[in-house]
Image: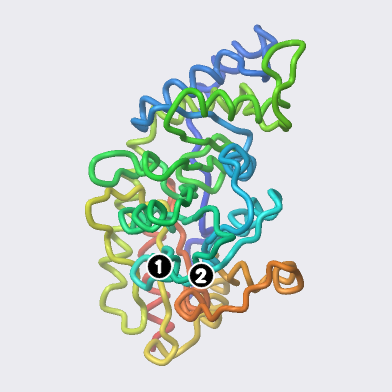
Amino acid sequence: MKNNLEKSIYVSQPYLPDIDEFIPYLRQIWDSKELTNNGPFHREFENKLAEFLGVPCISVFANGTLALITAIKVLGISGEVITTPYSFVATANSLVWNNIKPVFVDVESEFCTLDPEKILASVTSKTSAILPVHVYGNPCNIERIAEIAEVNGLKVIYDAAHAFGVNYKEKSICNYGDISILSFHATKMFNTMEGGAIICKDSQTKRQIDHLKNFGFVNETDVVAFGINSKMNEIQAALGILQLKNYDIVVEKRRGITQKYREGLKEIEGITFLPEAKEANSNYSYFPVFVDEKIYGISRDQLYNKLITKGIYGRRYFYPLINEYTVYKNSPYSCKSELPIAKRASESVICLPIFPELDLKDVDYIINCFNDFSK
């Protein structure tokens, strides 16, 4: 099959508003000369974001990794934290940067989120918290994780980097757990070029977070915490304000692409995809498919490489598992446990291209390639 589109189709492309809409914000920044340090757009973005998401308190950051590192620090977590191997490496790295040992446990097969019973079986006297990930924006088993945390006196930090705008049981997914973090990286369905946020439940915790992200300063002459510099700048914040206005348009376009994939791929034997989560809305942030080599006829990696020859660049997201990276295998953080479900998902997944500007004809082309390769 020839790629008559004469272009490459990448897994993601950041949504950006019309440049003419952004220029007035830039002019205000140029005129004020306020580039950072809790400027007016920073404050406005935090307020509008909290209202938009329906959360009590939010603090925006330069990126999601710094937000997660700070969230772990503000809760005073130490020792060991149970987390997932099926995530971006920043999830575990943020623990290591806080001198905490990540304890990797397996995921459940339906949504690739942490298996609560595997969490329970791994709790020890050294465990201080659970760090689950809402994988591909699908909610974890929130109720069961909350039960396990309460019985064992554990904190829960949700890595909600994929879950911007997702509601569970009619309230923001970010309202669950002790703290949630978001990422606004360019690859995310809501982006501020780079960026992130911590969602917490009260103003006192937000005050501590705000101290930590600004060197620990409480005023001009006093430092009250061992803080770092992880503030969001004014250009990021201004873009975030503008992006909120277009959020519904972005979701609707991604929804249309998702529906087309589901319809076009559902009859192809050996190709499966995740079900729609119950009691939750989707933000359509990713469209992962899973390849059964025995049924489909070729392996995931063979399919991945064949797609590239046709100009289609998917992503094996998440592959390899975090515990399989060299730095984790050859360190005190190495994982001795068997993780069969996460391993199987990692070795069979491809996330397909999905972004608002993706033409539905391109989606048809991708689906046709899947059909052709199975023959």
Residue in the image at 40% along x and 76% along y:
370
**Amino acid marked by disc 2:** Val
- The answer, for residue 317, to whether it is visible in the render is no
Say which quadrant the C terminus sits in: bottom left
Q: CA distance from mark 1 to mark 2?
A: 8 Å
Dot 1 crowding, Cα within 10 Å, few <14, some 14–19, many 20+: many
Q: Are marks 1 and 2 in contact (CB under 8 Å)?
A: yes
Q: Position of residue 352 (x, y in %)?
A: 45, 64
Is 275 in front, or is 5?
275
SS at badge 1? loop
- The residue that mark 2 highlights is 105
Which numbered marker is on residue 115?
1
Is 230 in front, or is 82?
82
Q: Position of residue 154 (x, y in %)?
A: 47, 52
Which numbered marker is on residue 77?
none
Q: Please indicate whether residue 256 sits to the left or right of residue 22 in the image.
A: left
Residue in the image at 66% along x and 30% along y:
212
SS at badge 2? loop
**Amino acid marked by disc 1:** Asp
- The answer, for residue 269, to whether it is visible in the render is yes
Q: Please indicate whether residue 286 sits to the left or right of residue 141 in the image.
A: right
Seen in the picture, residue 131 relative to 180 is either above or below; the reply is below
Q: Please indicate whether residue 7 sits to the left or right of residue 293 in the image.
A: right
Earlier in the chain: of badge 1 and badge 2, it is 2
Residue positioned most to the front: 125
Is 78 in front, or is 335?
78
Seen in the picture, residue 373 relative to 320 is either above or below; the reply is below
